[in-house]
Image: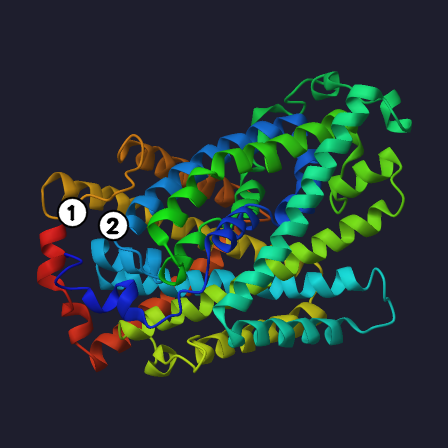
């Protein structure tokens, strides 16, 4: 399918969105997408499982994430649309895959929003224990909903400051940790040493197998990094801002994940971490920083609200893309006077609100199940990006499509490596008894989408024949 003939209405100029996201905001959204609650909270349990080798797991997964983002970058500069990976799946794999990917990405953000909103209410209880959790969650839900309705500029500005808080906190932690290691100040200086990375049963204290089992949690920590792709239709200058945002990903991963964890594990022995203990809280407490726990609690609250804010933004855009393709109710395709997909955001917020109620009454383990489902949905999205990239490169090499101005290094070879890696992580999820429930949920979700697709075909046969001749040219 050629972008010139078939998808003119889906190019950025025809989408109707306001180009309200500047370079500063896109850059910070990209940075914030690589820093989430998975790092601030989830890393504690993973350190207990893998010890210092968790650093290597984050670095390994970070390389794969860079492959994924360069593949997405090549597609984005070939045809920048806010539907992003759903639209590319539709173009290179067929209408059903675009439909499946769009709805699955919507599911990922809705369930993530459920978890993050409830988590944010719990963090507020740290300071105000007398306020009912549901009240705080409802207030955050309404505020973020309003922000997303007003304009994309306000969304971008709020996300900019959310990300700024996270980045500043991590840089501060790294600088303070380096000071402890170099000058030995505070009580932590007596035991802080680089040798802590191997002095307690080695770098892989519980074996390589145990370290590999943390990859599910590691990949969850990287969810939302692909959000840059959804901003393509609303970036002021996507040809400049998107490549810059993607190319700076390696140093962000090296600094904020690998660097921060390395410093923390040098300052605090890995044996002192456990599930439910934030490594950043533990490090601040060890160093003896006044109000350290409160500072980290504020940062984690910011991370949760940032994730929920991004979820509202992306779900509305994805529902609109599905509606434009005839794969969701037409009401989702309408833009408000502020050029936001208000109805799609509203419906997504309703589902997130149901999640707040559910998370209030179900056991604590539900949070873990929700994050597992989000990870599985995220892996599917990443796989679709990679497969679409492979097929796009084939079409370019055959002369059927124009080359992108931002080609991925290594061509499609790196995409093949990333595909194998993601399938391996899926196998690990299936192997782990606690996390494999998400695969059952995804199987039910796939069946539901399959039934929905059959109904769509019966009511609107042209959906399956849409672009069929052009799709065969690409294939």
Image x and y of residue 25, in percent: 51, 55
Name the secondary structure under disc 1.
loop
In front: 190, or 340? Answer: 340
Count of marks placed on residues: 2
Q: Which residue is mark 1?
A: 402
Query: Compared with residue 235, is residue 409 higher up or lower down, i.e. above or below?
Result: above
Q: Quadrant of the N terminus?
A: bottom left
419 left or right, relative to 340: left
Which colour assignment does the render follow?
rainbow
146 to the left or right of 235: right
> Label 2: which residue?
78
Residue at 45% from the left image edge and 33% from the top image edge: 63
Mark toward the start of the polypeptide (1 vs 2): 2
Question: Can you give x and y, in whole percent of width and height, for residue 106 in the image?
Answer: 44, 65
Q: Residues within 10 Å of mark 2 (few under 14, many from 20)?
A: some
User: How far across and how far down the image is residue 160, in percent?
Assistant: 58, 56
Q: Nearer the viewer, residue 440 or 83?
A: 83
Residue 246 lies left or right of residue 125; in this view the side is: left
Q: Quadrant of residue 318?
A: bottom left
Q: Residue at image x 37%, y 55%?
A: 237
Query: Tags 1 and 2 in contact by the CB under 8 Å rule?
Result: yes
Compute the Cα span from label 1 to label 2. Answer: 8 Å
Of helix, strand and loop, which one carries label 2?
A: helix
Residue in the picture at 44% in, 50% down: 226
Residue 369 position by quadrant:
bottom right
The answer to whether residue 212 of the structure is visible from this angle is: no
How crowded pointer 1 is (Cα within 10 Å; few <14, some 14-19, many 20+) is rated as some
Q: Position of residue 150 (x, y in %)?
A: 53, 76
Look at 73% across and 16% down and name the residue there.
195
């Amino acid at each position: 399918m050629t972008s010139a003939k078939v998808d003119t209405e889906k190019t950025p100029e025809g989408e109707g969105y306001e180009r309200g996201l500047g370079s500063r905001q896109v850059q910070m959204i990209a940075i914030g997408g690589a820093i989430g609650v998975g790092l601030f909270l989830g890393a504690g349990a993973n350190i207990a499982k893998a010890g210092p080798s968790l650093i290597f797991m984050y670095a390994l997964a970070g390389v794969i994430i860079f492959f994924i983002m360069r593949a997405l970058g090549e597609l984005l500069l070939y045809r920048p649309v806010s539907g992003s990976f759903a639209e590319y799946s539709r173009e290179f794999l067929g209408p059903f895959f675009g439909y499946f990917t769009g709805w699955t990405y919507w599911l990922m953000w809705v369930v993530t929003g459920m978890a993050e909103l409830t988590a944010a209410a719990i963090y507020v209880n740290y300071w105000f224990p007398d306020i009912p959790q549901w009240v705080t969650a409802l207030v955050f839900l309404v505020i973020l909903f309003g922000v997303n309705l007003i304009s994309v500029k306000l969304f971008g500005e709020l996300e900019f400051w959310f990300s700024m808080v996270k980045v500043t906190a991590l840089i501060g932690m790294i600088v303070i940790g380096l000071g402890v290691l170099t000058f030995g100040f505070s009580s932590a200086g007596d035991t802080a040493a680089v040798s802590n990375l191997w002095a307690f049963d080695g770098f892989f204290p519980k074996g390589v197998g145990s370290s590999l089992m943390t990859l599910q949690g590691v990949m969850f920590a990287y969810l939302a990094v692909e959000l840059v792709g959804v901003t393509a239709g609303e970036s002021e200058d996507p040809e400049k801002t998107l490549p810059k945002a993607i190319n700076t990903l390696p140093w962000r991963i090296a600094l904020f994940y690998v660097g921060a964890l390395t410093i923390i594990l040098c300052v605090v022995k890995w044996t002192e971490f456990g599930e439910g203990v934030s490594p950043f809280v533990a490090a601040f407490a060890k160093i003896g920083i006044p109000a350290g726990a409160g500072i980290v609690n504020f940062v984690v609250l910011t991370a949760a609200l940032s994730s929920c804010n991004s979820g509202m933004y992306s779900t509305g855009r994805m529902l609109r893309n599905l509606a434009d393709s005839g794969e969701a109710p037409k009401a989702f395709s309408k833009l408000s006077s502020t050029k936001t997909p208000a109805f799609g955001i509203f419906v997504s917020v309703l589902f997130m609100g149901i999640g707040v109620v559910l998370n209030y009454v179900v056991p604590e383990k539900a949070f873990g199940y929700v994050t597992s489902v989000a990870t599985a949905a995220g892996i599917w999205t990443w796989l679709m990006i990679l497969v679409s990239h492979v097929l796009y490169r084939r079409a370019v090499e055959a002369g059927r499509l124009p080359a992108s101005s931002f080609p991925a290094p290594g061509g499609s070879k790196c995409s093949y490596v990333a595909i194998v890696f993601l399938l391996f992580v899926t196998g690990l999820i299936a192997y782990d008894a606690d996390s494999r429930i998400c695969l059952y949920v995804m199987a039910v979700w796939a069946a539901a989408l399959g039934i929905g697709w059959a109904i769509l075909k019966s009511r609107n046969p042209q959906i399956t024949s849409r672009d069929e001749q052009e799709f065969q040219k690409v294939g």
